[in-house]
Image (cartoon, rainbow, N blue to C red):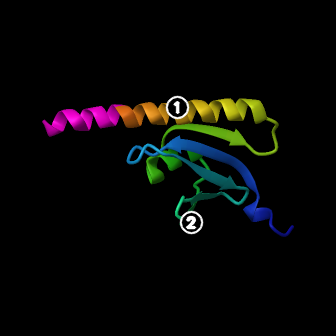
Amino acid sequence: MPGRSKKLIETWYGINPKNFEVERVSVTLSGLLAKWGKDGSYAAIPSSGDDPKREIAIVWALRDLICFKHGKSQAGNRSEKLCMLHERAVKMRKAAGKRSDTHRH
């Protein structure tokens, strides 16, 4: 079936600890982990298939990962969870800013 390998089966969202931005990685039916950057960059690696959460945490160092399966109705739940993840990223950014301020003195 054409396009089968590019079909998304799940999308993971996590916090990048370097810039405290929420980033996403998609998992395709063929087992590819694909990540698009805000700057239009694209990176993809084949997944071992065992544990995408672990692989994403190792390869892209994303934290506080949450997953949404494609094809399942999760609209309200998805929105709420993503909002909470963004709020957590803001708190982490603020906490990191306070830590760096104390190191400057």
Residue 10 versus residue 81 in the image, above or below: below
Residue 11 appears left or right of 58 = right
Residue 71 seen:
yes
Label 1 sits on residue? 87
Residue 90 versus residue 11 in the image, above or below: above
Look at the magenta stretch and give its main secondary structure. Answer: helix
Name the one closer to the observer, 77 or 103: 103
Count of residue discs = 2
Residue 67 spot, x, y in % from top left: 64, 39
Q: Residue most toward the left?
A: 105
Q: Residue at x 40, y 43 (%)?
A: 17
Name the one closer to the observer, 15 or 61: 15
Magenta highlight range: 95-105
Residue 45 spot, x, y in % from top left: 55, 62
Q: Quadrant of the C terminus?
A: top left
Residue 40, labelled with which disc? Answer: 2
Residue 93 spot, x, y in % from top left: 39, 37
> Which residue type does callout 1 highlight?
Glu
Q: Residue at x 37, y 33 (%)?
A: 94
How far is mark 1 from mark 2, CA to CA?
24 Å
Q: Is residue 24 magenta?
A: no
Is disc 1 placed on a helix, strand or loop?
helix
Q: Between disc 1 and disc 2, whose residue precedes?
A: 2
Residue 28 spot, x, y in % from top left: 70, 56
> Which residue type does callout 2 highlight?
Gly
Name the one closer to the observer, 62 or 20: 20
Is disc 2 placed on a helix, strand or loop?
loop
Q: Quadrant of the N terminus?
A: bottom right
Q: Residue at x 66, y 47 (%)?
A: 11
